[in-house]
Amino acid sequence: MQFLGRVGTVLLGLSLVMAMCLPVGAVEPVKIGVLGPMSFTQGEGHWNGATMAADEINKAGGVKVAGVMRPIKLIKVDTNEFLSIPDATNAVEMAISRYNVDFLVGGFRTEAVQVMQDIAMDAKKIFIGCGAAHPELCTRVTKDYDRYKYWFRLTPINSKFLGKVDFILLGTAAAIMKKTLGIKKIKVAVVAEKAAWADPIVHISQKVLPAKMGMEVVGVWRPSPVAKDCTAELAAIQRSGAHIVFTTFSSSVGLTFAKQMGELKVPAVAVGINVESQKSGFWEATGGKGNYVETINTYARVAITPKTIPFYDKYVKLYNQAPNYTAGTYDALYILKEAVEKAGSVNSDKVLPFLEKTDYIDTAGRVVFDKSHDVTWGPGYVTAIGTQWQDGEIKCVWPYHWQKVFYEGTVPFKLPPWVVDYWKNKK
Amino acid sequence: MGLPGVYFRRTVKVLRTEVLVLPSRVAVLVFIVALMALPIFTQDYYFLRVLILTSIFAIFAASWDLLSGFTGQMNFGHALFFGVAAYVTALLNLKLGLPPYFSIPLGAVGGVLTGLIVGIPCLRLKGSYLALTTLAFPIILTGVVFAIPDITGGELGLAGLSRLTGSRVMDYYLTSGLMLILGFTMWKITDSKTGIILHAIREDELAVRTAGVNTTRYKLLAFCMSGFFAGVAGGLYAHFMRLAGPSGLEVGLSFQVIIWAVFGGMVTIYGPIAGVFILYPLMEILRVVLDNFPSLPEIRMFIFAGLVLLTLLFMPEGLIPWVRDKIETECPRCKVRNVFSRHRCRVCDADLD
Amino acid sequence: MILDIIIDGLIKGSVYALLAIGFSLVLGVARIINIAHTALYMTAAYLIYIGTKMMGLPAPVAMVASILLTVVLGLLIYNFFIKPIQEHEAAVLIATIAVAMMIQEVFLMIFGGHYLGVNPLIDGYATILGVKVTYQHLLALGLALVVLLATRVFLQKTRLGLAIRSTAQDREVANLMGMNVTRVAMGTMAVSVGMAAITGAIVVPLVTVEPTMWMHPLIMMLAIVVLGGLGSIEGSFVGAFILGFAESMVVFLLPMGSFLKDSVALSIMILVLLIRPEGLFGVSFEEER
């Protein structure tokens, strides 16, 4: 034990020395830690988005800090947060105390991000979240501003606004169904993964759908976020005679559900949130059975801003997949660059006031942080979009002339042909 | 020569006759001194964080050994105690505002109650039945956690607990000190009459029963004690991470603790502790080393699992018992342990070769 | 509704049964709690993905190849990592956990955490009594029945089957009677891994292929084996359907609580064990009597 303990200490010491012997250039780079589960799609998004932005910025000379052009150096921080939360905290602590990162971007699983946020706040490091949607992360800023002021959220819009968009998408789909199929009262099956963030959506839908939107809720199903089989739920939904399946999924269950729903050709349209269907791999993973699934999304190949399509195309070219919202690290880097240049420093307290005043057109819309350091939602700001899988391609279907918002390249929402057939024959 | 002198001489004597004669005891001494002295040399946040978590998991692994190693009640769902105590601690801290020195012991009491609740149905089960049944409990509880998000926070867990102590160094001394004290306590328990009975139950329950011992009561006691120590670990974890969440109940954690304990060497208490102190920092060393090779995929876990597998092939009893057998021999006559280089027993002078 | 529950439960149960029977065999004969059992099931699934999607092989060829490769892998694991430490129960246990973790990490390294999918052998669905069932699920159900029958015949009518049964009953006496217990264990391992691989092959089009897909079936499988009684093939079969029905009943009767289906299924297992500690069809092992 003595011997091994010593070997351990020596090894740890050696490796730390190795870690400290980083190449030192003439100018100190601006160091940004990219946090994410790097073996998973989410982490890949974090890393790819950040790499793309860093390469672009460095090619253009770097970040101008108080008259000196400093390059960006990214530190890849594999948080492994899906499998181990202590691992995530160790990784963040290492990035801060070993690599002395100036800023942090990324993060995904809310349970882990809360802890990572605490570590970043302890060290007074600005942390721009690109992945976790829970409002609690930003509520902390309003509750304890002095401590949590270094936290910002860029993507996605928080789950309260996600809920709003969600109901707009549902209303739009229902209107289309009514019109094309002549259905008088739309029946909705609410299916939401059992998670705290989905609870308000379920709660509101049970109230708002019958009272305000003139629809009937035929049932609420709450499968586990990691359920591997949804055939029972689907059989029950089919029995209920639902026209629309209002989905709220952020985890793997979304994929299982969509795949089995397509396989069984359940005569209903899936509308809502299904994070899995935002990924390029969705089509292949469902074997094309996920056709016509609609979800809220952040990116699609439409001109949300003039920057979106170039960003989207370059991303697809470089990484051979479409960006999902964790690739918001791309914009996070540009937003940081702007604030750092204005502040003329990388010191968190100096950058902070400029970051708070951010008004920046990025790839997903116009970014303005609100009081809780959350990204503002609404027409003229970041709206988020609705996308639908149409024969192997992700198409933007919303906003389709909503509040005078229309992004060039948006196409109309399509009903699955078997749904049309089923309800036409039924009459 | 005043009183301090007497104590000093006595300490030196104990050191010379009881500690320095055996390499394993020297190792323990060096380990304790090194652990206590470490913050003098470095107060690096990352370094201390890793060692704090190591200490917490060491308590956890030793508590598994206390139940599974000593009574043979193989527990596949040990994360249950850890998770329940973490939630109880978090609730007490957040809802009632209890400070850590109240909430952690009470959380551990939660672990004891869990031990009782799980222990009673499990008493009728034996061997593999028990092992596989215990796996189910944390999963059932995870369902409950998700069912009542108002209390448990659902997938978010409960965050924002008050800090363990004011500073990282104090956190370090608290956790490593507790680890040493609780480790020693557990070791003493296994050495006591209770411990011997537990050990006997493992070897032959029927015989123990025939000897007039109420084995049921002892097995339940083992569940409760193990629940208590695992609970302390869970409470410390919750306060240190400032989070109690569903990840504390995951199957992965239950498996992890078995690996640590069996790798280090079951039925020893110090084996699992050593197992954690080797394997947990190893993962971090790998992280630091592999960071220099960014092109490699994430292979830390692979190396970890491979290493465990290879170690077992050569040392199926675990690492520490294997090492101990190499450096020490037991006197055939008086059962006292001797350093391997001796030819005659240090107590009874019997021939060792 | 009752029809839905029955059909859905039957299908769920059949997949579980395939896994549980294979696991049960090895447990009964060699006393190995093989945690890596479902990791091998995952291996077969990934191999089929590689075969059909990456190498463009026809599905049946890829299936057979992947089953064979998985069996070989299983035997290699048994030979190199389990057999040498067979006498140490705890060591075997964590060896199988470590193997499972290594398999998971290998696929995580190669494919990342991406969710992958394989096309079904037979596309589409049938409508039975108003309930839609995919052909693939029907195939799984049919195969579960065939495999169960085949296993029965194999155990009752062949020499190896006889050897397996006698070893399961009393290892020492079997050894004394001149049976090569190690070889019997090898044979059992091959059959067991083969069944895991076959399950993987059938189930793969219905599930998402990803590196942690072995965890959930593992838990359900362990629960079934305990419920049915360790080492009992019939027990595993019945247990699988009990848990399958339990799961679908939860979804149909308590839609808001569908996420509780695992919890409910596992609670049923614990309740049964409270009444019958040796499981439904269990025979207490000699050394544990």
Image: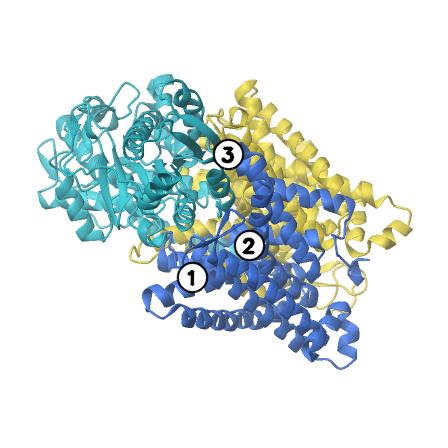
Chain colours: A cyan, B yellow, C blue
Q: Nearer the viewer, residue B255 or A271?
A: A271
Chain that bears disc 2: A
Q: Is residue A354 above or below residue A396?
A: above
Res A356 quadrant in image: top left
User: How far, Cα to Cα, is label 1 from label 3?
Assistant: 42 Å
Q: Nearer the viewer, residue B298 or A349?
A: B298
Disc 2 marks a residue whose amino acid type is: Gln
- How crowded pointer 2 is (Cα within 10 Å; few <14, some 14-19, many 20+) is rated as some
| Residue receiving disc 1 | C122
User: How far, Cα to Cα, is label 2 from label 3?
Assistant: 36 Å
- Left or right: B310, with A335 as reference point: right
Residue A310 position, x and y percent, is 12, 43
Disc 3 marks a residue whose amino acid type is: Gly
Task: Note whether residue B139 is visible.
Answer: no
- Left or right: C85, with A83 as reference point: right
- Left or right: A404, with C9 as reference point: left
Disc 1 marks a residue whose amino acid type is: Ile
Residue C51 position, x and y percent, is 37, 68
Chain that bears disc 3: B
| Residue receiving disc 2 | A2
